[in-house]
Amino acid sequence: MFLQLPTRTLDLGRPRIMGVLNVTPDSFSDGGRYVQPDAAVQHARLMVEEGATIIDVGGESTRPGAEPVPEAEELDRVVPVIERLRRELDCVISVDTMKPAVMDAACAAGAELVNDVLALQAPGALEVVARRRAAVCLMHMQGEPRSMQRDPRYGDVVAEVRDFLARRLQACAGAGIAAASLLVDPGIGFGKTDAHNLRLMAELDTLLGLGRPVLVGVSRKSMLGRLLGLPAERRLHPGLAVAAVAAWLGASVVRTHDVAATAEAVSMSWTLRQARTIQR
Ligand code: PT1
């Protein structure tokens, strides 16, 4: 499978790593260490050397409880960093935003992929992405970051997430966005209990049935600590296990803060999976 970007294609014949580049002073795990453009670019360079194909630049945290960031502030954070990444690094640049104006400015600065936890539901978002010919990650979220973990409820979480993503794929088609430019994402931790997250992981093949590559992000999420009774600083190893399983089940992109370790875990999982496919 390939992902159509504005001026090239990304080969997803093997799983790719999306490295998280937070340019927020309040990010849940990087604690604002990369707010300076120099430090951000340096961190991105390291992630590319460690095996990241995509760098996901975010100026507004979407973790549970996070407060919205004003548009002007978000633009100030992400645009200078994207301009420098474009000039200095060889990677696909993604912008993690819910705001159409930020999507537009980010694409003008060199972003090729829009990673939107709102799946382009904001007024004007579909139009911006269509005009820019950007690729998109459509993610499922119940509620909004500030309050989404208060009382998440579903009848059948897998069916509801699948049907939501199918409707957003349709909305993109209606706006003239090429199917080949679209990724889908169950949104692990976004308005979901641990049981909901586990069901979505266990039934990832249901999302593969949508016919588009699947992105999974579990890196450092609170579910990992809760399920195993571990403190926040010990989420790396369970996160690697989930990344390996996601790749085994067919995820095409794994979003992570811990690129070197995740790239190795995913490569090993993929190598084993390939050996099985060839043998049978
Ligand atoms: C994700 C994702 C994302 N996750 C995509 N974009 C985050 N496409 C940001 C917790 O429970 O999975 N896919 N952008 C980070 N979101 C969270 C959610 C961080 C939950 C932490 C938690 O700790």
Image (cartoon, rainbow, N blue to C red):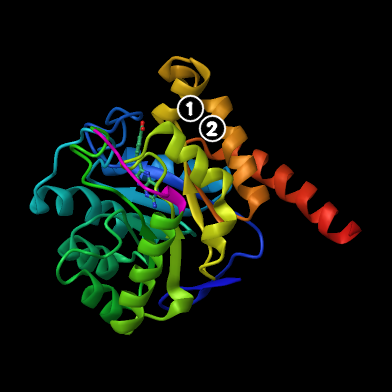
Q: Quadrant of the N terminus?
A: bottom right
Query: Which corner quadrant of the image does residue 177 belong to?
Result: bottom left
- Give the x, y percent position of residue 274: 79, 55
Residue in the picture at 44% in, 56% down: 159
- Give the x, y percent position of residue 122: 18, 63
Of the residues under marks 1 and 2, which one precedes in the sequence? 1
- Give the x, y percent position of residue 37: 28, 44
Q: Is residue 263 visible?
A: no
Is the residue marked 1 within 8 Å of ligand 1, measured from its CB? no
Range of residues picked out in magenta: 151-158
Q: Which mark is residue 239?
A: 2
Residue in the picture at 21% in, 33% down: 65
Q: Which mark is residue 167?
A: none
Q: Secondary structure at mark 2?
A: helix
**Label 1 to label 2: alpha-carbon separation:** 7 Å
Split into quadrants, the picture shows ligand 1 in the one at top left
Amino acid at pointer 1? Leu
Q: Residues within 10 Å of mark 2 (few under 14, many from 20)?
A: many
Q: Circle 1 is placed at which residue position?
A: 224
**Does the magenta segment cover residue 15?**
no
Q: Is residue 146 visible?
A: yes
The correct choice, above or below, for 22 with respect to 212 in the image is: above
User: Total marks drawn?
Assistant: 2
Amino acid at pointer 2? Gly
Report the mark closest to the observer, 1 or 2. Answer: 1
